[in-house]
Amino acid sequence: MKVIKKTHQMQIISDKLRMQGKTIGFVPTMGALHQAHIELIKRARKQNDIVIVSIFVNPLQFGPKEDYNKYPRPIKQDLKICRNEKVDYVFYPPVDEMYPKDGNLTFVEVTKLEDILCGKYRSGHFRGVATVVSKLFNIVKPHNAYFGEKDYQQLKIIERMVNDLNFDVKIIPVPTVRDIDGLAYSSRNLYLSDKERSVASSLYKSLVFCKELIQQKKYTLKQCIQKSKKYLDTLLSSVEHKIQYFEIYDNDLNPVPQNLKEIPSGKRIRIFVAVFIGNTRLIDNIEVTV
Ligand code: AMP
């Protein structure tokens, strides 16, 4: 396994691999690798000749009051995980390699899709994500790139960007990977105290609760959401918390009718939640077939 820190060197390697007819699978990450990242890497390993993982905590996608400085960076452990998973190259650039001193004057924005859910509360976040992923695609030149459904809005934004801008890469979604109690793996789970961690699966529980209410078809969506938020508040009552949003969209992130009877049977929709537990912001989502 080789660790590459220079963008130009990564491009030369990828060009060579492509010329040799090798397929490149790419897993972009911010490091602090966990079981879900490993799942993405395993998928890439199965479906490609070469696997490239990037580890880059992207300053452009963090707001001024967010956790850029304290984001975990256990690079030794991350490299060990990559080695175990038979990753071929880890692209691990320093910030000034990705953003030279005068920064970027060019940004990628996926309008509309970035105005809802997390985008409403994290101004500039998805612009930062779309910009860095565009850069990474131009540097790593993958055939296939793997993204988790845990960050569903991010996945949809990247899919749309690839379509709109004709990037020559296939986006492969990977289902959310959860701990045994249902909590979706996230690098930010490391911030939780033991007490907070013990109730953090409440996000998932409230999503399942809401899914069951929807499938009963007795309530409007608004009522389902109200009841689920109340349930979530109760589950989290022993810790400091704040529900940021609890919302429902269809799988393409279009709004859905309030009256469930107006939604065609068999249509797949998605419930999204974002919660602060203490200072830690967690998100999750699940699909529901109506
Ligand atoms: P991150 O390092 O948090 O930027 O995540 C890198 C990739 O891993 C993104 O495509 C995430 O959506 C994906 N990912 C993170 N957590 C999970 C999870 N619990 N299940 C599935 N994918 C995940």
Image (cartoon, grey):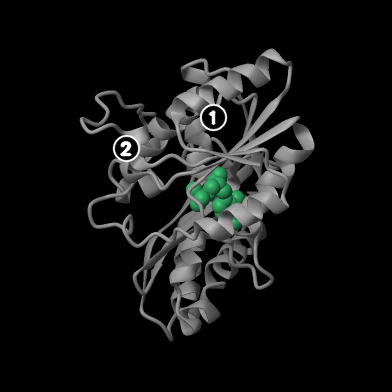
Residue 8 falls left or right of residue 128: right
Specify whether residue 62 is in view: yes
Closer to us: 52 or 175: 52
Specify whether residue 287 is in view: no
Q: Could you tell me which residue is drawn at 29 percent across and 57 percent down?
A: 66
Query: Are there few (<14), some (14-19), or many (20+) residues within 10 Å of tag 1?
Result: some
Q: Position of residue 282 (x, y in %)?
A: 45, 62
Can you identify the residue that label 1 sits on?
Answer: 159
The amino acid type, in three-letter code, at marker 2 is Asp
Query: Are there few (<14), some (14-19), or many (20+) residues within 10 Å of tag 2?
Result: few
Q: How many labels does the image show?
A: 2
**Residues under labels 1 and 2: Cα distance?**
27 Å
Q: Could you tell me which residue is drawn at 67 percent across and 52 percent down?
A: 38
Q: Position of residue 203 (x, y in %)?
A: 52, 67
For numbered disc 1, what is the local secondary structure?
helix
Closer to us: 36 or 19: 19
- In the image, is the residue at mark 2 within 8 Å of ligand 1 by its beta carbon? no
The amino acid type, in three-letter code, at marker 1 is Glu
Q: Where is residue 287 in the image (x, y as percent from the top left)?
A: 63, 50
Q: Position of residue 131 (x, y in %)?
A: 38, 31
Q: Could you tell me which residue is drawn at 47 percent across and 79 percent down?
A: 196
What mark, if any, has residue 96 been given in the picture? 2
